[in-house]
Image: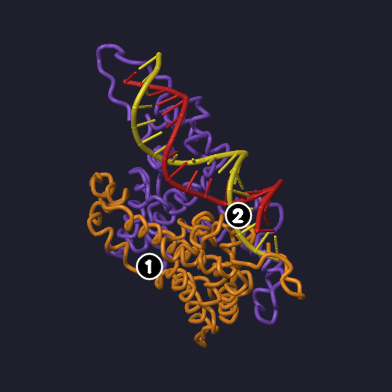
Chain colours: A purple, B orange, C yellow, D red
Amino acid sequence: MPRGATKGGPPGRPPTTSRAAILDAARELIERDGWEKLTIRRLATEIGASPATVYYHVRDKDDLLVQVLNFYAEELLTPRPELPDDPRERIAAAATLMHDGLAARPWVVEIITADDLLGESALWFVESMLEGAIAAGADPERAVHLYRQIWYYTAGEILIRARRSRRHGEIEGPTFREQALARLDPDLYPRLSAVADRWPELTAEDTYAAGLRALIGAALP
Amino acid sequence: MPRGATKGGPPGRPPTTSRAAILDAARELIERDGWEKLTIRRLATEIGASPATVYYHVRDKDDLLVQVLNFYAEELLTPRPELPDDPRERIAAAATLMHDGLAARPWVVEIITADDLLGESALWFVESMLEGAIAAGADPERAVHLYRQIWYYTAGEILIRARRSRRHGEIEGPTFREQALARLDPDLYPRLSAVADRWPELTAEDTYAAGLRALIGAALP
DNA sequence: ACCTGAACACCGTTCAAGT
DNA sequence: ACCTGAACACCGTTCAAGT
């Protein structure tokens, strides 16, 4: 951790790397090569320093990740988005903004769920959904429960889609699941067999909005 | 991969390790120390062999994981569970079985979503939900969409809960998120501040069934 | 047929020492 | 004050060689 610079001129070795430069490089690395490629060692190489140097500016890898997440949350929420007047629509709009923001950078969900890391700015989404639910007549408990249901649904959607497309990018052939679907016993699994060949197409369709509205509609009085 | 034994007596060195023994040890290791502790090297130590020996019996780590998952899927689905007569209830029951099966071993979700690994037996859940939806009057597309929504919601719930409790187990203090909630600006986030102290309790409550029924009710005619 | 030592190409993290 | 070499304790995987 950098000790605060004293006022009277530079008393020691002048910096060649800064915390900001490290964060920039980390973002670039993630965006270029994917978040699983972000390692302290690669990052060090990227900025032309030793791994130990990174540890002088950053506490550990988690610390680095929180900062990166915060950057994106700020970017997405500056300026604060306008939300519709109708409370239910407000919830839907906030959830959809969150969903789309995450869908643009799906690896963010991995980190959020893995480490429960979340900057204060991201709480704007939570606040907006709670506010909408309470305005629609829910008590605070119900509002929290609805938010949670939306969060589970949203995180699940992003995670599963992200991991699927990662696989599709990496590997040539069909996924394990698609192979299993192809050689299914139609007597044991008639419904599944009937849609097996349309499976990739059907599961690629975006039904996020429908599920979201189902959750909102059922939770609010 | 083991070459099939020829009929006329043992022509080579007799085995001291088998694929089955490796799978048993893998399951035991996961159950004892958690799934992130399952490494080929640890597994080898556990069975008193070298890492390279594991690779003689198992293609790679993914291969090992598929086998372990299949074991649990079989266990859960033998004998095949009875489902209610009412189609909607059938979907809810199949989803809840899947949910509870996953909740008992949350790390399974990590592997399923990460690697799209899924044995044929686990497809019973999918078949049951599709069948219920079609029996309730949905066309196949709608049935697939409903199944997917349920899967997103279920996987998200398990993943987020699992990772939360893992953190809670490991670390002493409150999570990052709880810390952020505690020192929230009540003017910026009034609704969130109002429930901040009850957050752990409120989010611990199980509202899976409510969300599930919301999705089913909204999707079916 | 089955098993292994040794290596390859990686990780995150620490710490005494250098400038 | 800032940076680093070298080490520690790990990974998954391969392959020539041994029994």
Q: Chain of mark 2?
A: B
Q: Which label is found at residue B52?
A: 2
- Occupied quadrant, residue A67: top left
The image shows residue B204, relative to residue B193, as above or below, that is below
Q: Secondary structure at mark 2?
A: helix
Do discs 1 and 2 belong to a common subunit?
Answer: no
Which of the pair C10/B158 is nearer the observer?
C10
Depth check: give the residue in front, B128 or B3.
B3
**Is A208 positioned to the left or the right of A201 in the image?**
left
Residue name at image x 59 percent, y 79 percent: B131
Nearest the viewer among A120 and A140 is A120
* Left or right: A68 in relation to B47: left
Kind of residue at disc 2 = Ala
Relative vertical location of residue D1 with respect to residue A71 in this rendering, above or below: above
**Where A180 sits versus B78, above or below?**
above
Tag count = 2
User: Which residue lies under the disc numbered 1?
Assistant: A219
Q: Name the mark on residue B132.
A: none
Q: Chain of mark 1?
A: A
Report if residue A80 is visible in the image: no
Give residue A79's position: percent from left, percent from top. Answer: 40, 38
As drawn, is B141 to the left or to the right of A31?
right
Q: Residue furthest bottom?
A: B85
Q: Mark 1 to mark 2: distance in Å?
A: 54 Å
